Image (spheres, rainbow, N blue to C red):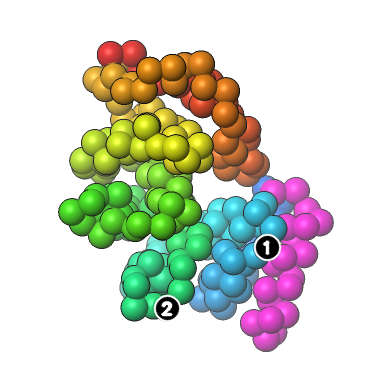
Amino acid sequence: MAMRQLKKQVEQLFQTSDFATALSCVAKMPARRVVNPLFGLLYHCDLQMRWFAVAAMGEVVSRLADREPESARVVMRRLMWNLNDESGGMGWGSPEAMGEIMARHPVLAREYAPILVSYLNPDGNFLEHEGLQEGVLWAVGRLARVRPHLMGDALAFITSHFTSGNTALRGLALWAATPLAHGGVECPVQGLFSDMAEVSIFQDGTLVRHTIAGLASKFPKG
Protein backbone atom coordinates (compact mmCIF):
# COMPACT_ATOMS: atom_id res chain seq x y z
CA MET A 1 0.00 0.00 0.00
CA ALA A 2 1.39 3.42 -0.99
CA MET A 3 2.07 5.96 1.77
CA ARG A 4 -0.73 8.23 0.54
CA GLN A 5 -3.24 5.38 0.74
CA LEU A 6 -2.01 4.36 4.18
CA LYS A 7 -2.29 7.94 5.40
CA LYS A 8 -5.87 8.08 4.09
CA GLN A 9 -6.68 4.78 5.80
CA VAL A 10 -5.34 6.04 9.13
CA GLU A 11 -7.21 9.31 8.73
CA GLN A 12 -10.48 7.48 8.02
CA LEU A 13 -9.99 5.25 11.05
CA PHE A 14 -9.83 8.27 13.34
CA GLN A 15 -12.80 9.88 11.61
CA THR A 16 -15.09 6.84 11.76
CA SER A 17 -14.01 4.86 14.84
CA ASP A 18 -13.84 5.67 18.51
CA PHE A 19 -10.41 6.77 19.70
CA ALA A 20 -9.41 3.53 21.45
CA THR A 21 -10.46 1.33 18.53
CA ALA A 22 -8.68 3.52 15.98
CA LEU A 23 -5.52 3.60 18.07
CA SER A 24 -5.57 -0.18 18.42
CA CYS A 25 -5.97 -0.64 14.66
CA VAL A 26 -3.12 1.73 13.84
CA ALA A 27 -0.88 0.01 16.39
CA LYS A 28 -1.30 -3.28 14.49
CA MET A 29 -0.06 -1.78 11.22
CA PRO A 30 3.62 -2.26 10.25
CA ALA A 31 5.33 0.30 12.45
CA ARG A 32 8.05 1.50 10.11
CA ARG A 33 5.51 1.96 7.31
CA VAL A 34 2.85 3.79 9.28
CA VAL A 35 5.28 6.27 10.88
CA ASN A 36 5.56 8.39 7.73
CA PRO A 37 1.79 8.85 7.33
CA LEU A 38 1.61 9.79 11.01
CA PHE A 39 4.28 12.43 10.49
CA GLY A 40 2.07 13.88 7.75
CA LEU A 41 -0.99 13.91 10.00
CA LEU A 42 0.87 15.98 12.60
CA TYR A 43 0.25 18.86 10.17
CA HIS A 44 -3.44 18.08 9.54
CA CYS A 45 -5.76 21.08 9.38
CA ASP A 46 -8.10 19.48 11.94
CA LEU A 47 -6.80 19.91 15.50
CA GLN A 48 -8.37 16.70 16.78
CA MET A 49 -6.77 14.74 13.93
CA ARG A 50 -3.36 16.17 14.83
CA TRP A 51 -3.77 15.03 18.42
CA PHE A 52 -4.83 11.58 17.27
CA ALA A 53 -1.62 11.46 15.23
CA VAL A 54 0.38 12.38 18.34
CA ALA A 55 -1.25 9.57 20.33
CA ALA A 56 -0.79 7.07 17.50
CA MET A 57 2.86 8.07 17.09
CA GLY A 58 3.36 7.37 20.79
CA GLU A 59 1.77 3.94 20.57
CA VAL A 60 3.46 2.89 17.33
CA VAL A 61 6.98 4.09 18.20
CA SER A 62 6.88 2.69 21.74
CA ARG A 63 6.01 -0.73 20.30
CA LEU A 64 8.70 -0.33 17.66
CA ALA A 65 11.23 0.44 20.40
CA ASP A 66 10.55 -2.94 22.04
CA ARG A 67 11.48 -4.78 18.84
CA GLU A 68 13.81 -2.40 17.01
CA PRO A 69 15.18 0.17 19.43
CA GLU A 70 17.46 1.81 16.89
CA SER A 71 14.55 2.33 14.47
CA ALA A 72 12.65 4.05 17.27
CA ARG A 73 15.66 6.28 17.94
CA VAL A 74 15.66 7.23 14.26
CA VAL A 75 12.08 8.48 14.69
CA MET A 76 13.05 10.45 17.79
CA ARG A 77 15.97 12.03 15.95
CA ARG A 78 13.67 12.91 13.08
CA LEU A 79 11.29 14.65 15.47
CA MET A 80 14.23 16.54 16.93
CA TRP A 81 15.42 17.50 13.45
CA ASN A 82 11.98 18.96 12.73
CA LEU A 83 12.61 21.38 15.61
CA ASN A 84 16.02 22.40 14.29
CA ASP A 85 16.23 25.74 12.48
CA GLU A 86 18.15 24.01 9.70
CA SER A 87 15.19 21.74 8.93
CA GLY A 88 13.37 24.59 7.19
CA GLY A 89 10.04 23.61 8.78
CA MET A 90 8.08 24.54 11.89
CA GLY A 91 8.04 21.16 13.61
CA TRP A 92 4.34 21.25 14.47
CA GLY A 93 3.43 18.29 16.65
CA SER A 94 7.02 17.14 17.10
CA PRO A 95 7.39 18.07 20.81
CA GLU A 96 4.02 16.52 21.57
CA ALA A 97 4.94 13.31 19.74
CA MET A 98 8.24 13.14 21.63
CA GLY A 99 6.42 13.54 24.94
CA GLU A 100 3.83 10.90 24.08
CA ILE A 101 6.47 8.40 22.97
CA MET A 102 8.49 8.91 26.14
CA ALA A 103 5.42 8.66 28.35
CA ARG A 104 4.86 5.21 26.83
CA HIS A 105 8.44 3.92 26.74
CA PRO A 106 10.82 4.13 29.74
CA VAL A 107 14.07 3.54 27.84
CA LEU A 108 13.43 6.28 25.30
CA ALA A 109 12.29 8.53 28.15
CA ARG A 110 15.60 8.14 29.98
CA GLU A 111 17.52 8.91 26.80
CA TYR A 112 15.55 11.87 25.49
CA ALA A 113 13.83 13.57 28.46
CA PRO A 114 16.77 15.99 29.00
CA ILE A 115 16.51 17.07 25.36
CA LEU A 116 12.79 17.74 25.73
CA VAL A 117 13.40 19.86 28.84
CA SER A 118 16.17 21.75 27.01
CA TYR A 119 13.55 23.17 24.64
CA LEU A 120 12.23 25.19 27.62
CA ASN A 121 15.65 26.36 28.76
CA PRO A 122 16.65 29.87 27.59
CA ASP A 123 20.28 28.75 27.85
CA GLY A 124 19.60 25.46 26.11
CA ASN A 125 17.70 24.62 22.93
CA PHE A 126 14.88 27.09 23.65
CA LEU A 127 12.17 27.20 20.99
CA GLU A 128 11.16 30.82 20.53
CA HIS A 129 7.91 30.26 18.64
CA GLU A 130 5.04 30.34 21.15
CA GLY A 131 3.15 27.60 19.30
CA LEU A 132 6.10 25.26 19.69
CA GLN A 133 6.48 26.26 23.35
CA GLU A 134 2.86 25.21 23.85
CA GLY A 135 3.76 21.83 22.39
CA VAL A 136 6.78 21.45 24.65
CA LEU A 137 4.76 22.37 27.75
CA TRP A 138 2.14 19.77 26.85
CA ALA A 139 4.86 17.16 26.25
CA VAL A 140 6.57 17.92 29.57
CA GLY A 141 3.22 17.80 31.36
CA ARG A 142 2.38 14.46 29.75
CA LEU A 143 5.74 12.96 30.66
CA ALA A 144 5.70 14.48 34.16
CA ARG A 145 2.51 12.61 34.95
CA VAL A 146 4.21 9.29 34.22
CA ARG A 147 7.93 9.83 34.91
CA PRO A 148 8.37 12.97 37.04
CA HIS A 149 11.81 11.81 38.19
CA LEU A 150 13.16 12.50 34.67
CA MET A 151 12.11 16.14 34.53
CA GLY A 152 15.29 17.62 35.95
CA ASP A 153 15.10 21.43 36.10
CA ALA A 154 11.89 21.61 34.08
CA LEU A 155 9.82 23.18 36.85
CA ALA A 156 11.93 26.34 36.98
CA PHE A 157 11.50 26.84 33.24
CA ILE A 158 7.78 26.02 33.27
CA THR A 159 6.85 28.54 35.96
CA SER A 160 8.29 31.40 33.91
CA HIS A 161 5.20 31.02 31.70
CA PHE A 162 2.78 31.66 34.59
CA THR A 163 2.92 35.37 33.78
CA SER A 164 2.56 34.95 30.00
CA GLY A 165 0.03 37.04 28.16
CA ASN A 166 -0.67 33.97 26.02
CA THR A 167 -3.57 32.08 27.61
CA ALA A 168 -2.50 28.72 26.18
CA LEU A 169 1.03 29.09 27.55
CA ARG A 170 -0.29 30.16 30.95
CA GLY A 171 -2.71 27.26 31.17
CA LEU A 172 -0.36 24.61 29.81
CA ALA A 173 2.36 25.79 32.18
CA LEU A 174 0.05 25.35 35.16
CA TRP A 175 -1.01 21.92 33.91
CA ALA A 176 2.60 20.85 33.26
CA ALA A 177 3.91 22.14 36.59
CA THR A 178 1.20 20.61 38.78
CA PRO A 179 2.66 17.07 39.03
CA LEU A 180 6.14 18.49 39.69
CA ALA A 181 5.48 21.21 42.25
CA HIS A 182 4.67 19.17 45.38
CA GLY A 183 3.73 22.32 47.25
CA GLY A 184 7.17 23.81 46.81
CA VAL A 185 6.34 26.60 44.35
CA GLU A 186 4.15 29.59 44.94
CA CYS A 187 2.00 30.80 42.07
CA PRO A 188 3.61 34.14 41.13
CA VAL A 189 0.54 35.68 39.50
CA GLN A 190 -1.81 37.73 41.62
CA GLY A 191 -5.34 37.03 40.50
CA LEU A 192 -4.49 33.75 38.73
CA PHE A 193 -7.09 31.95 40.81
CA SER A 194 -9.78 34.21 39.38
CA ASP A 195 -8.55 34.03 35.77
CA MET A 196 -11.48 32.63 33.77
CA ALA A 197 -9.67 32.49 30.42
CA GLU A 198 -9.98 29.02 28.83
CA VAL A 199 -7.47 26.62 27.34
CA SER A 200 -7.96 23.22 25.65
CA ILE A 201 -5.66 20.37 26.74
CA PHE A 202 -5.54 16.93 25.13
CA GLN A 203 -6.17 14.33 27.82
CA ASP A 204 -7.16 10.67 27.54
CA GLY A 205 -8.05 10.87 23.87
CA THR A 206 -10.03 14.09 23.86
CA LEU A 207 -9.59 17.85 24.09
CA VAL A 208 -10.69 19.07 27.51
CA ARG A 209 -11.55 22.72 28.21
CA HIS A 210 -10.14 24.21 31.40
CA THR A 211 -10.21 27.67 32.89
CA ILE A 212 -6.93 29.05 34.21
CA ALA A 213 -8.64 29.40 37.58
CA GLY A 214 -9.63 25.74 37.52
CA LEU A 215 -6.07 24.66 36.73
CA ALA A 216 -4.70 26.96 39.42
CA SER A 217 -7.04 25.45 41.99
CA LYS A 218 -5.32 22.07 41.44
CA PHE A 219 -1.84 23.51 41.85
CA PRO A 220 -0.11 22.33 45.06
CA LYS A 221 -0.20 24.92 47.79
CA GLY A 222 3.16 26.15 49.07
Image spot of residue 173 (x, y percent):
40, 36
Q: Residue at x 67, y 48 (%)?
A: 20
The residue carrying pointer 2 sits among few (fewer than 14), some (14 to 19) or many (20 or more) residues within 10 Å by Cα, namely: few
Q: Main secondary structure of the magenta part?
A: helix
**Residue furthest toward the right?**
16
Image spot of residue 176 (x, y percent):
40, 36
Q: Secondary structure at mark 2?
A: loop
Q: Quarter-wise, where is residue 53 in the image?
A: bottom right
Q: Which residues are magenta?
A: 1-19
Question: What's the amino acid at mark 1?
Answer: Cys
Q: Residue at x 26, y 22 (%)?
A: 185
Residue 28 in sight here: no
Report whether 47 appears left or right of 99. right
In the image, residue 101 lies in the stretch drawn in magenta: no
Distance of mark 1 from mark 2, alpha carbons?
Answer: 20 Å
Question: What's the amino acid at mark 2?
Answer: Gly
Q: Secondary structure at mark 1?
A: loop
Q: Is residue 181 above or below residue 103?
A: above
**Residue furthest toward the left?**
123
Count the marks.
2
Q: Residue at x 21, y 56 (%)?
A: 124
Report whether 70 appears left or right of 88. left
Q: Is residue 107 above or below residue 192?
A: below
Image spot of residue 46 (x, y percent):
69, 58
- Of residues 125 and 143, the one nearer the viewer is 125
Residue 88 is marked as: 2
Q: Residue at x 62, y 35 (%)?
A: 208
Nearest to N terminus: mark 1 or mark 2: 1
Q: Quarter-wise, where is residue 65 in the image?
A: bottom left
**Mark 1 and mark 2 residues within 8 Å of each other at the beta carbon:** no
Residue that carries the numbered disc 1 in the rendered image: 45
Q: Is residue 5 above or below residue 161?
A: below
